[in-house]
Image: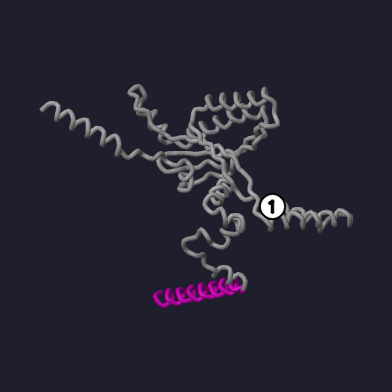
Amino acid sequence: MFETILSYIIIAGLAVFLFKTRRKPPDKISELFSFRKIAPDGLIDLDGRRFRLVLEVDPINLALKSAGEQNAVWNAFRSAVASLKCNLTLLVQTQYLDLSEYIRQQKAFAESAPTEELQDTAERLVGFFRQKFEESAHRTRKYYIILRHDYTLERNPLISARRKKEEKENIELIARQELEDSRNILTAALSPVGLRITQLTRHEVLQMIYRTLCRQLANIQPIEKADYAEAFCVVSRSATPLIKELLGGEEDFSEEETEGESKKNSNKEALSTRNG
């Protein structure tokens, strides 16, 4: 009897172990898509008192460095990560190489070149890059460090209720301070070895999210043109103010409004005279 019960327990334990659904870890990248707000300096506010800061890293070619320089880079990176107070996510993103801004600058230079030789050189350069850009879609890599801060209130009986209330009121300030401290630690540790770190602004964060969600479209239509075409609007913007401005109806409307107000005032004066 005891052996039968023991065998049942072992079988049940094996079944639970084999068929147990492992919990999938949350995706640290897709959480950026559901942001509550993004500050002008790039601080991302997510639901649940979570804050993120995205840093872009300009890479270096380790293959061109000596063994001692490579060890120095890795040691600097390890010491910087070990010194951080918050968690981080390393993101390597493949994007289409966009040369449209460079081509536009060279085209503007060609139009305002002081000599014909410089103008001819700039035009040939524009034609070369435009042909290369249109023939094949070249790709480039972007390297990001996403600093994560998830606010959790400490359940410590030694902490007073007043201090806990102050922490709740200053959640964003505390998160900003911690994330900026981590950014400064990374910058101070990686800059001497040639790794330049730049904090993304609000516009740059939106561009990164846009390129992540719409990789094919981002190469053809920038985020500014997509926004102008109301690609992100649930309800289309009304064109009535624009039409009124083009037709010059705003002045007529103001004149009609003033005439209507004068008529109302005259009617009120007439009524007050009769009542008097």
Q: Amino acid at mark 1?
A: Leu
Query: In this image, 145 relative to 129: left or right?
Result: left
Image height check: is 253 above or below 24?
A: below
Is 20 one of the magenta-colored residues?
no
The answer to which quarter of the image holds residue 119 is bottom right
Query: In this image, 120 relative to 132: left or right?
Result: right
Mark 1, residue position: 99
Query: In this image, 120 relative to 57: left or right?
Result: right
> x, y (%) of residue 170?
45, 35
Could you tell me which secondary element the residue under label 1 belongs to?
loop
What number of labels is visible?
1
Q: Is residue 139 visible?
A: yes
Please report the bounds of the magenta region as a residue range.
Answer: 247-276
> x, y (%) of residue 223?
58, 55
Q: Write the residue at 65% across / 26% down.
A: 70
Is 250 one of the magenta-colored residues?
yes
Image height check: is 33 above or below 230?
A: above
Neighbourhood count class around disc 1 (C-alpha, 10 Å): few under 14, some 14–19, many 20 upward:
some
Q: Write the residue at 39% across / 32% down.
A: 152
Q: Write the residue at 42% across / 43% down.
A: 47
Relative depth, front residue between 8 and 212: 8
The answer to which quarter of the image holds residue 103 is bottom right
Mostly what secondary structure, the magenta segment? helix
> x, y (%) of residue 12?
22, 34
Image height check: is 46 above or below 86?
A: below
> x, y (%) of residue 140?
63, 46
The answer to which quarter of the image holds residue 164 is top left
Quarter of the picture containing the N terminus is top left
Query: In this image, 226 relative to 66: left or right?
Result: left
Quarter of the picture containing the C terminus is bottom left
